[in-house]
Amino acid sequence: MQPDRERQSKPYALVTGASSGLGESFAHDLARRGHDLVLVSENLKELERVKADIESQHDSSVFILEADLFHPAAAERVFDFCLRKRISIDILINNAGIYLNIERELNDIKSVENVINLHVMSLAKLCFLFCKEMMERKLGYILNVSSINSEFPDPASLTYGPTKRFILAFTESLHCEMREHNVHVTCLTPGGIKTNFFTANDVFIPPVIRRTLLSSDECARKSLDALFRGRARITPGLSGKIQSFFLRLMTRPSTYHLIKKSYFSMKKKST
C-alpha cells in the first residue's frame, strides 16, 4: 500500500525520541511551521503528553507510535506504521539517542548492543526506508542528530562518540548522494543542550560547560533552519562551536589519560 498524497492536507514530519528534550522541541517547532507529525518514542505516556500539548497549541494532526528503537526490527515497524496510516513522510528527524557511561559498557554488554542498534542500525534503516520515497517524489528532508563527541575520544564513554561519528560520516555521504534527487540531508552536531538527557543518562557535565548549555528550543529552531536551507552540517550556537573547538584541541590520544583523570576528579568532587 502506497501513501495517498491527496489525503494529506499538510506535509508530515516524523521525529524519533520525541517524548522529551530536543525531540519534543523539534516536534513543537515543526508544528509551528505548519507540519503534521508522527512522533516516535518508547515512552508512551510522555508521547501522549506531547501530542496533547501540540494539538492544544497548534493546528496540527499528531500520530504517536510507541516503539523501542533498540530493537533490530524497529525501523521497519515505524515505516510500516506510516504505510498503514497512509502517511507520506516529507521530513525525517532522527533524534533518538542514549549515552552509556564506561562502567555500564564494561558490565552490561546488552546495553552496548542497544546503543549500536539505536545510533547505527535503526537510524540508517530509517534513512534508507524513507529516502527511497523521497527520491521518487524528488523532495524530502532528513536531519540526523550526531554530537560534537563524534570529534574526539571521550574518556567517559567508549560507544557514544564512535556511534555518533558513524552518524556524522553516514549523513555526509547521504547529503552528497541525495542532492541530485532534491532530498536535503543535514547532520546536527550539537554541543551541550539544556535537557534532561544528562540526568537521565547519568552524565557528569563540568561546570564550565554546564554554564554554556544551549536551550533545546533554540537548538531545534537553528537546526531546522539549516535543514531547510540545505546545509550539510550545523553546530548551533556560539557555545557549541566553542565547546567543539576546545574539546577537539584538548582531547586527543596523546592527552587522553590526562583528560580522563581530570574529568573523573571533577566528577568525584561534584558528588
Image: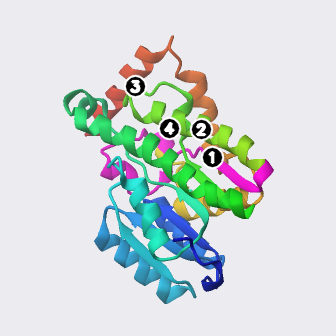
Q: Could you tell me if the residues under marks 1 and 2 are in contact, i.e. CB atoms within 8 Å?
A: no
Check residue 164 in the rendering and tell me which mark sits there, or answer none: 4
Q: Position of residue 200 (x, y in %)?
A: 31, 52
Image point (39%, 60%), residue name: 77
- C-alpha gap between disc 1 and disc 2: 9 Å
CA neighbours of label 3 inside 10 A, class few (<14), some (14 to 19), many (20+): some
Q: Could you tell me if the residues under marks 3 and 2 are in contact, i.e. CB atoms within 8 Å?
A: no
Magenta highlight range: 180-209
Q: Could you tell me if the residues under marks 4 and 2 are in contact, i.e. CB atoms within 8 Å?
A: no
- Callout 3, which amino acid? Pro
- C-alpha gap between disc 1 and disc 4: 10 Å
**Eye-nearest disc, 1 or 2:** 2
- C-alpha gap between disc 3 and disc 2: 24 Å
Quarter of image, res 168: top right
| Image side of residue 133 versus residue 14, left or right | right
Image point (57%, 69%), residue name: 13
- Counting residues from the start of the chain, the first of labels 3 and 1 encountered is 3
- Callout 4, which amino acid? Lys
Q: Which residue is mark 2?
A: 170
Q: Could you tell me if the residues under marks 3 and 4 are in contact, i.e. CB atoms within 8 Å?
A: no
Q: Which residue is mark 1?
A: 187
- Counting residues from the start of the chain, the first of labels 4 and 2 encountered is 4
With respect to residue 17, does 7 lie above or below?
below
Image point (43%, 54%), residue name: 75
- C-alpha gap between disc 3 and disc 4: 15 Å
Residue 201 visible to the viewer: yes
